Image (cartoon, rainbow, N blue to C red):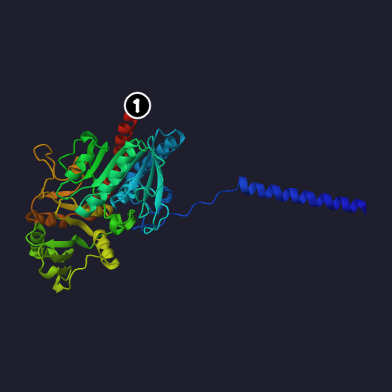
Amino acid sequence: MRLTRKRLCSFLIALYCLFSLYAAYHVFFGRRRRAPAASPRGLRKGAAPALERRGREQSALESEEWNPWEGDEKNEQQHRFKTSLQIVNKSTKGKTELSVQIWGKAAIGLYLWEHIFEGVLDPTDVTAQWREGNSIVGRTQFSFITGPAVVPGYFSIDVNNVVLILNGREKTKVFYATQWLLYAQNLVQTQKLQHLAVVLLGNEHCNNEWISQFLKRNGGSVELLFIIYDSPWINEVDVFQWPLGVATYRNFPVVEASWSMLHDERPYLCNFLGTVYENSSRQALMEILKQDGNDKLCWVTAREQSLTPPWGQEHMLVFESPRSNIGLCKRWQPQETNESFKNYQDALLQSDLTLCPAGVNTESYRIYEACSYGSIPVVEDVMTPGGCGNTSVHHSAPLQLLKSMGAPFIFIKNWKELPAVLEQEKTIILREKIQRRKMLLRWYQHFKTELKMRFTDIIESTFLMNNKG
């Protein structure tokens, strides 16, 4: 009896060991399952986390079903991905020499953080009172805070270096921005901060004299100024040009290229959705589009606004392709609806060209939003009234930054040139359009990456050098 029990116990122990070995084999030596192929993605609603985005990019590189750049560019993408990994690994392994906090008190801060830095914000809810994120670039650890709860004197200061992002486009915004600068200047003077830089959404006429008193060269505390629009102050020493970017104030998303975005035939030759002011070049554009039936080939939705509307009313003249219905509509409400915003995004996605007439300034959100969807911007290359540009010094004005970085746009001086552009467009075959879209998207990605590295290099060279000094 004892022998039988002993044999039974030995058998059970042996069976347990065999099962353990079997399980261990499958855990450590079994074949790993392949990750599912990435599905085509067109538009991302909101800013997805950067790690998730990089994961999708890697899946796209490894998947034969989704490869928007095709075989001739596969090696380039793989090299870029490996290089980015090397940069990340090198940055995280090495000790950072600088810590910089970015205070985002203007919507353009989201373009810097989510579009250029490809950073993540927590929480993702755009209505949150406080949002923050972190990113390492080069030798610098960047942190970013934004939201209504970021108020002078009501949050702790645990950094020595700050980049303050402000809106100085209008008088009310200037007052608000001035309060922030006075607060930051006091922190520098009391040695709670060492270094201060500013990214400024400047006035569209480049009338920004109000901030000059805060520049370090004038006795203030702002060591570096990155300013939007072609300011004559730009000297590449302490004042640098910064892009307007997309309209993040209305939650324009980070757009990811899909197969269909690159390869599908687009039903419209061009698009323009925007306000048309009296006696402006936009009004001339509308007249030219009506000629030769071109308005039937383009997606056009215009709201006609008087510069001096009676009783404060603004009327909207809408004619929408391909039927070109013309009619007078009710007073235009400046608050954009979800439907009108979706129509705008669809127009960009479904048009080969995006018409970008000058407004108060030549630079517009539309230029960058067209790039996001692979629609070639047709830009009215004229200086607008005001103090922007200095043609005797900067011969590339307006849009000096874009031109200096080789923007592959169509620049025209007068909308009378548009019919010839559209006629030429009709002769371009789909294969050529696909290559052109790829070129535009590649350039736009390079543009943002280059800006990130330039921005970081300028911050590092100035702040670290002044530390040593």
Check the image and report above or below for 438 versus 141. Answer: below
Is residue 263 visible in the rendered image? The answer is: no
> Going by the image, does 439 lie left or right of 289?
right
Q: Nearer the viewer, residue 420 or 123?
A: 123
- How many C-alpha atoms fall within 10 Å of the one at disc 1: few (<14), some, or many (≥20)? few
Q: Quadrant of residue 417?
A: bottom left
Check the image and report above or below for 395 versus 319. Answer: above
> Going by the image, does 14 lie left or right of 401?
right
Residue 348: horizontal and vertical position, in percent?
24, 59
Q: Nearer the viewer, residue 30 or 45?
A: 45
Residue 44: horizontal and vertical position, in percent?
36, 57
Count all numbered tags in the image, as a single digit: 1
Residue 20: horizontal and vertical position, in percent?
70, 49
Q: Residue at x 19, y 56 (%)?
A: 353
Is residue 132 visible in the rendered image? The answer is: yes
> Going by the image, does 236 lie left or right of 103?
left
Give the quarter of the figure containing the N terminus. bottom right
Residue 26: horizontal and vertical position, in percent?
63, 49
Q: Residue furthest right?
A: 1
> Going by the image, does 116 lie left or right of 12?
left
Q: Nearer the viewer, residue 98 or 217?
A: 217
Residue holding disc 1: 468
**Residue at disc 1, secondary structure:** helix
Q: Quadrant of residue 139?
A: top left
Three-letter amino acid code at the position of disc 1: Lys
Q: Residue furthest top?
A: 469
Give the quarter of the figure containing the C terminus. top left
